Image (cartoon, rainbow, N blue to C red):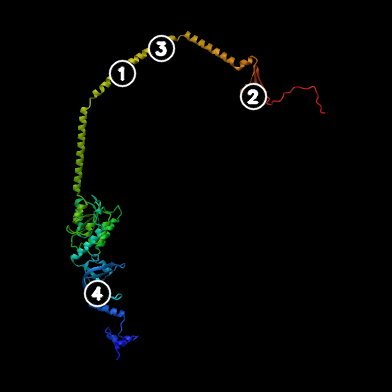
Amino acid sequence: MSDPLFDAAARLLAGDAPADNATPTATASGNSVMSVGEFAGKLKRAVESEFGSVRLRGEISGYKRVASGHAYLSLKDDSAVLDGVIWKGQVAALGFQPQDGAEVIVSGRITTYPGRSKYQIIIDRMELAGEGALMALLEKLKAKLAAEGLFSADRKRPLPFMPRTIGVVTSPTGAVIRDILHRLEDRCPTHVLVWPVKVQGAGAAEEVAAAIRGFDAMPPETRPDLVIVARGGGSIEDLWAFNEEVVVRALAACTIPTISAVGHETDTTLADFAADRRAPTPTAAAEIAVPVLADLRLTIAGYGQRTEKCARRYHERGRERLTALVRVLPRRDALLGPQRQRADDIGARLDRGLERRVTLARGQLDRSAGALRLATLERQLERARDRTAAAWRLVQSLGPNSILDRGYAFVSARVGGAVVGSAAAARAAGAVTLHFRDGEVDAKVERGGGKGYAGPSGDQPTLL
């Protein structure tokens, strides 16, 4: 007897066979086979109609946000794992930044993804599962940022003593900005720039961070000297925007000194650790930012009085020291008496010396005047004339003209007039002048060494 199951398995071509997934319409038409896509669509509609909206609790795992802006994650507990999707618009509406390990409660609808044959939840809302989960997420983020050094004391900068311009990042409609302005007006009026932001809810953290970066990017001539990030009190959920990583990093990267004034004295956020100074309240932030003008004036006046007293004290001490020195210094007459007496002695000696000098000079003048007689001067003049005449006769006797008177002559070169004293000099001169007593004769010197003309000869020369 043949087995129908064996026979059906042995067939190569598919034929009609009863199946559990056949719909009444498909059975009536004689076709009981569905495609994978048809079955996936039917399953998707069945799941969505059965689970319209669900609320689940679980731990986030594998959270990531892709370039399109959507976010993908997994919710898990001890026994199961469920994939989840948050569309771009819902991600921006979340009140906190999801992180792996955070326990949350999500609301959404269950659906399937036929492309991977998986069911998943489309998340419309996400909340932290109680304050314990919120604090666990806060501590985890705090440890991460502290490990990067964003809370280090070395990064803290001193606040300006008296800032000319203060920037305030807060809500423009709350009581915080009014308290800060009134407190600044009471203590020390200062120019204030307010950057209005949301301080709670979706997008608040991004606005606060953008305001801090905006103040930091202003030109130096208009940029504030101090930035105050302020918000009133509230629950940890209300203050959560100031625990976001984007706000903490903006405060840490700001080059302007910052004060965090978020909540009341008992409230602590991560912004307090990243700022250069924490104020317990927004009013206290205004008190920290500026000094009291009246106290400042009083302090300056006190410094002026102390400076004046100090100057007077130094003046009095100097006068006392000068008086003490005057007592031990000798008197003027005692110092100058010997010098005055010596000057008087020298003056008297000078007068006597001048008188003696004049007397001696007068006696010498008288003796010289007695020696100056007219006959004596004439005799001295006659002797001088005789000596001069004798010297002139000697000069004339030694001159060349005296030789000419005795019948001699002397030779000089025609060019230049130098006296020629040798035959070689005469031949070198060529043309000479002979000087006689009664005149001069020009002559030419023969330079050759040939014979002179001997006169005519009696013999007639012959040509034969």
Q: Earlier in the sequence, mark 1 or mark 4?
A: 4
**Crowdedness near tag 3: few (<14), some (14–19) or many (≥20) residues, C-alpha within 10 Å:** few
Q: Nearer the viewer, mark 3 or mark 2?
A: 2
Q: Earlier in the sequence, mark 2 or mark 1?
A: 1
Q: Position of residue 275 (x, y in %)?
A: 23, 56
> How far is disc 3 from disc 2 in space, using C-alphas?
66 Å
Q: Secondary structure at mark 2?
A: helix
Kindly indicate the quadrant of the structure image that contains residue 15.
Answer: bottom left
Residue 424: assigned label: 2
In this rendering, the answer to whether 236 lies above or below 400 is below
> How far is disc 4 from disc 3 in space, using C-alphas?
151 Å
Q: Nearer the viewer, mark 1 or mark 4?
A: 4
Kindly indicate the quadrant of the structure image that contains residue 33.
Answer: bottom left
Q: Position of residue 382 (x, y in %)?
A: 51, 10
Q: Label 2 sits on what residue type?
A: Ala
Q: Label 3 sits on what residue type?
A: Leu
Q: Is residue 8 visible?
A: yes
Kindly indicate the quadrant of the structure image that contains residue 146.
Answer: bottom left
Q: Earlier in the sequence, mark 3 or mark 2?
A: 3
Q: Which residue is at a point 22% across and 31% down the rendered structure image? A: 322
> How far is disc 2 from disc 1 in space, using C-alphas?
81 Å
> How far is disc 1 from disc 4 in space, using C-alphas?
132 Å
In this rendering, the answer to whether 411 lies above or below 195 is above
Residue 365: assigned label: 3
Q: Secondary structure at mark 4?
A: strand
Q: Which residue is mark 4?
A: 110
Q: Earlier in the sequence, mark 1 or mark 3?
A: 1
Q: Earlier in the sequence, mark 4 or mark 3?
A: 4
Q: Which residue is mark 1?
A: 346
Q: Nearer the viewer, mark 4 or mark 3?
A: 4
Q: Position of residue 37 (x, y in %)?
A: 31, 79
Q: Label 1 sits on what residue type?
A: Ile
